[in-house]
Every structure is written in structure tokens, then in C-alpha cells.
Image (cartoon, rainbow, N blue to C red):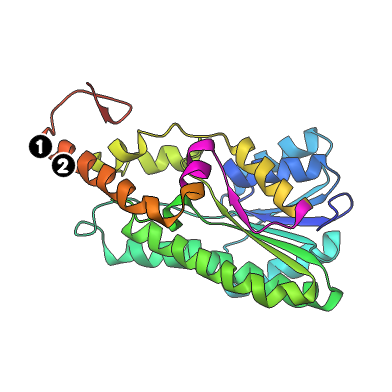
Amino acid sequence: MQVIPGAHALVTGGSSGIGHAIAALLGEKGARITIWARGEERLASAAAALRARGIDVYAESVDVSDPAAVAAGHERAVAQHGPVDILVTSAGVSHPGRFLDLDDQVFRDMIEIDYFGTLHPIRAVTPGMVQRGRGSIVGISSACALLGVYGYTAYGAAKFAVRGLLEALRGELKPHGVHVACVYPPDVDTPMLAAENEYKPAETAAISGAVNPISADTVARGVVRAIEKGTFAVYSGIQLRALVALGPMINPVVDRVFDRTVRKMQQNPDAPRVHGKLEP
């Protein structure tokens, strides 16, 4: 379990969405916050919003896909707030699309940002955490890392990789007193989801339209509970928790539902829809 008051929490992707909500909640609980993101203007605005809430925050533009930039940014964060006690890797991108339509670069981008953008910060903070015998590492994966979803061959593969990294890392770091958690959010009402919706194939939109997006604050509360209690898996949203509770045996049923949705979309491409779903 990690004590949050007085801890130094580094949150990648902290300028918006899930990362910003987590940074805010950790800050309100007394942590000193470092947020990283690439967009300097949005980063400055996010930092100002956190400071307005009385949160001690240090913000820096860091490209998490660049290991040298991450190492240098980590050194500056430590100089500002001391050793990192909590790392949350929330930086990520999503570009849905049909496998045959996606450029090779999309697959590379997903791996570079979503996977290596998780790996590099973990590699930077882990030696210090192991040396001190404490710390908490939280990676934001995705519900797409629990089962394959139409249109997410690039994004889903990267998030499956994040899941595999964190599952293996949990066992390696636990004997050293370092907590590891993996978060599996479904669709979350964030700017990333809005951008993602511009690229979604109709079939993907129909599948995701069956589930209402949850709030970033809901994910943040689950993350903070995992840090405080030392739990590994964080499943956000009632529907996702129900799916996980039923276990792998439910996956064939889910696959059939997905297949039926795709088939209906392809048979009726011009049918009216509500929130991506076919009208009855």
C-alpha cells in the first residue's frame, strides 16, 4: 500500500482526460504532482487548473516515446519534487480502423506511444523504487486488452502488450515492496475518445455504442483506491466489471454479439442509427 499524502506522483498524459483526473485526485489527497504531456499549451492550462485547486504541480512537455527525453524529464522531476513514489502512465493515443485500411505507421505509432510510452517511464522510476523498497506503478491499459474488438487491431495489440508487461512486472517487483496495477477502462468521456470517434469504422461505432462512456473521474477513483489498497487489476464501469466477473467463458458469447452487430451493420449500411446503434 502506498501513502499518498506527501508522495511525489508523476502522471504522464496529465494534461487532459484520465491523466488529468488522476493528477487532480492525487493532488487533492496531498501528493506533489508532476504532469507530462506533449502539447505545451494544453499542459500549461492543465497545470494552472491544478494550481487553482491548491495542488503543488510541476509540468513539463515530455515525449514518452523517446527514452532519452523520459530519462532527462525524470531527473528534472526528481530535482523539483524528490524521488517518484507514484507513477501513472496515462499518455496514449488511439487510431481505430479496419486492418486492411490502416497504414503501417499507425501500428508503429500505437506501439511507440501506448507501449513504449508506458515502458520508458517505468524503466526510469523503477530502480529508485526498488532501492527504497516502496512505490506504486499504475499503467493505463484498456478494455481492448481483455478481448479483441473490431477496428482495434493496432490499438488493441499495443494495450495487450501493456497488460502483459504489467502482469509480469507485478510478480517481479512485489518482493521489492513495489506495487504494480493495470487499469482496464472502457470508453471514457475524454478528448481522446472524441478524436477516436472521427476514425471509427461504422461497425466499431455500433459495438461501442452499446456501452455508455464513463467519466474520467470514475477511472481516477478506481486508480487511487488501487494505489491505497495495493490491488493489481482496476476494472472501471459496471458493465466491464460484470464481464470480467463472468470470466473467459463469456468471451464466445461476446464474440457472437460483436459478430451479429458487424453483420447487421454491413447488411444495412444506410439504416438510421442512434449513438452508433441501429434503430429498432
User: Is 8 left or right of 35, judged from the image as shown?
Assistant: right
Disc assigned to residue 267: 1
Q: Report the Cα–Cα distance between label 1 and label 2.
A: 6 Å
How many C-alpha atoms fall within 10 Å of the one at disc 1: few (<14), some, or many (≥20)? few
- The quarter of the picture where residue 202 lies is top left
User: Is 215 left or right of 210, judged from the image as shown?
Assistant: right
Tell me where residue 67 appears, x and y as whole percent.
Answer: 59, 74
Give the camera-side residue of 219 and 102: 219
Which quadrant of the figure contains the N terminus?
bottom right
Q: Which span of residues is magenta-colored?
A: 229-243
* Image: 254 above or below 172: above
Residue at 36% x, 39% y is 208
Disc assigned to residue 211: none
* Image: 2 above or below 23: below
Tell me where residue 62 appears, x and y as whole percent.
Answer: 62, 61
User: Is 163 left or right of 87, judged from the image as shown?
Assistant: left
Tell me where residue 214 appears, x and y as whole percent.
Answer: 52, 34
User: Is 258 left or right of 57, judged from the image as shown?
Assistant: left
Residue at 52% x, 46% y is 185
Identify the amino acid type marked 1. Gln
Whether 115 is among the magenta residues is no
How many C-alpha atoms fall within 10 Å of the one at disc 2: few (<14), some, or many (≥20)? few
**Residue 256 appearing in the image:** yes
* Image: 108 above or below 146: below
- The residue identified by callout 2 is 263
Residue at 43% x, 67% y is 111
Q: Secondary structure at mark 1?
A: helix
Whether 236 is among the magenta residues is yes
Identify the amino acid type marked 2. Arg
Q: Are marks 1 and 2 in contact (CB under 8 Å)?
A: yes
